[in-house]
Image (spheres, rainbow, N blue to C red):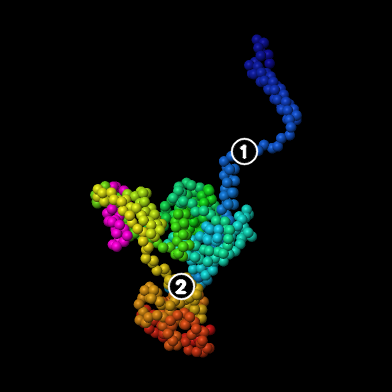
Amino acid sequence: MIMKDGAIPRALQKEVSLRRFTAALLCVLCGFVASTVLAAAQAPVQSAPTIVRHGLFALDEDLQKLAESVGPSVVTIEVSGLTTVLDPNTRQVTYIAKEQGMGSGIVVDPSGYILTNAHVVEHATSVSVLVYRHRNKTAGGAEDGQRFTARILGSDPLTDIALLKVEATDLPALKLADSDEVHVGQLCLAFGSPLGLQNTVTMGVISATQRQLNNTTPVVYLQTDAAINPGNSGGPLVDIKGEVVGMNTMIASQSGGSEGVGFSIPSNMIRFIYEQLRNYGHVRRGTIGIISRGITPALANGLGLPLQSGIIIEDVSPGSSADHSGLRSGDILLSLDGKPFQDPRALATALFQKNIGDTIVFKVQRATQVLTLYVLVTERERTPESILDPTHSAGNIVSKLGIVGMPVTDLVAKLIPPTRIPGGILVTALTAGGNAAQFGLQPGDVLHSLNRTPLDSLETLRKLLAGLQSGDPVVFNIERHGQLQYIALDNPE
């Protein structure tokens, strides 16, 4: 449009300029594209560009190698055994029934030594182990498994560790790490057979160390958020080097499944118990005879202590090695074998792992004096195991009566109420589906005689029962709650 003064409108000027600029830009781009196409056509053919191996790819490959390396040393444990159940009507009478279970284990020696949780093989009558010498890259890997019959060499219920032995050679074994070096936030992987799913691995971090779940025992745990579920028990918790830092043992859960709070026995504790079980078949526990507690400001102010924190010796058992060494109640612990301790739980754990015959160097403060005392670790008197547990031996079942019996030896007599007649057979439980209940027998009864023949062993009882003919009388003289009585019944078939 032409204006009165012959000038081109400003909007039209902008439009013309824009068109000129666009045309020029298109010419440049076309020239660049043409030259690029020509250069590409003339250049030799090259392979596709290589993907740069950045951090995530490296982590993925490292985890794959780690899983393939550790997997063959993790076994699946299958257990058949006995368990106790209660009479659904009375909720009192104990019965024995068969059960099957599954857990995981760690090969720690190529010659067939395998560690697992004690609760995995508790009450077991037979144990078999599935070994996968080569980790199957697909889920499960059962077709690669080799089955072995295992013997239980020893078990320690306090720490929940058991040692198994299979007749095998050249098994892939894992190394136990130094769990004192484990730190919060450290990457870890849990291996095992959760819910019966063999060849499973999960990843997480160490959430806490030195986690004590029971104040009455010195056992502490590593806490992790790596997924642990039923069936993981006894499997390893490993670091990124593939070394065992812990044994997966339990979870804290509202639902029964993993909620990210799992607990593993530290590898240093595992090593101590393993050596004890392998050498002696049980754990020889040491003692020095002290009781300690943490120093609080209130305690320090009330006793006039020079320190506001730390550990004070509360009591020293008379006649103990600590007593002989010169340790006294009121001594303040400065160090143990040159290492300072502020937490009584850590001190109890350190003492718990000392071997019998070790000499411990205590540095203590007594009033204004600093003393160095040498304390010998002596063997603690063995606490009698729960020998009355009816599931400990299937050989105690008297199937014809439907009972689990045990001869009343001197040791057993100390564990039960006094009896009026020495000896006899103690009924520790009834077998599920047996006839003992209808005959009137109860757990706790002591069988003194059968048809006037004294019962001094299970073999005698079985022999007498086997010799009965159909219709023969069966009269037991028993003792129940301190009272003698007769039980008459038909010959059980």
Q: Is residue 255 visible?
A: no
Q: Position of residue 400 (x, y in %)?
A: 51, 81
Q: Position of residue 403 (x, y in %)?
A: 47, 78
Can you say whether 352 is above or below 390 in the image?
Answer: above
Callout 1 secondary element: loop
| Observer-nearest of 340 and 158 | 340
Residue bounds of the magenta highlight: 307-331
Pointer 1 residue: 52
**Which of disc 1 and disc 2 is earlier in sequence?**
1
Q: Is residue 177 visible?
A: yes
| Observer-nearest of 449 and 170 | 170
Q: Residue at x 51, y 49 (%)?
A: 239
| Observer-nearest of 241 and 109 | 109
Classify residue 455 by image quadrant.
bottom left
- Image quarter of the N terminus: top right
Check residue 390 in the rendering and tell me which mark sits there, or answer none: 2
Q: Position of residue 182 (x, y in %)?
A: 46, 49
Horizontal arrangement in the rendering, residue 186 relative to residue 142 (left or right): left
Q: Position of residue 68 (x, y in %)?
A: 59, 52
Q: Residue at x 53, y 48 (%)?
A: 241
Indicate whether residue 329 is drawn in magenta. Answer: yes
Three-letter amino acid code at disc 1? Answer: Val
Horizontal arrangement in the rendering, residue 247 relative to residue 36 (left or right): left
Q: Residue at x 65, y 38 (%)?
A: 50
Disc count in the image? 2
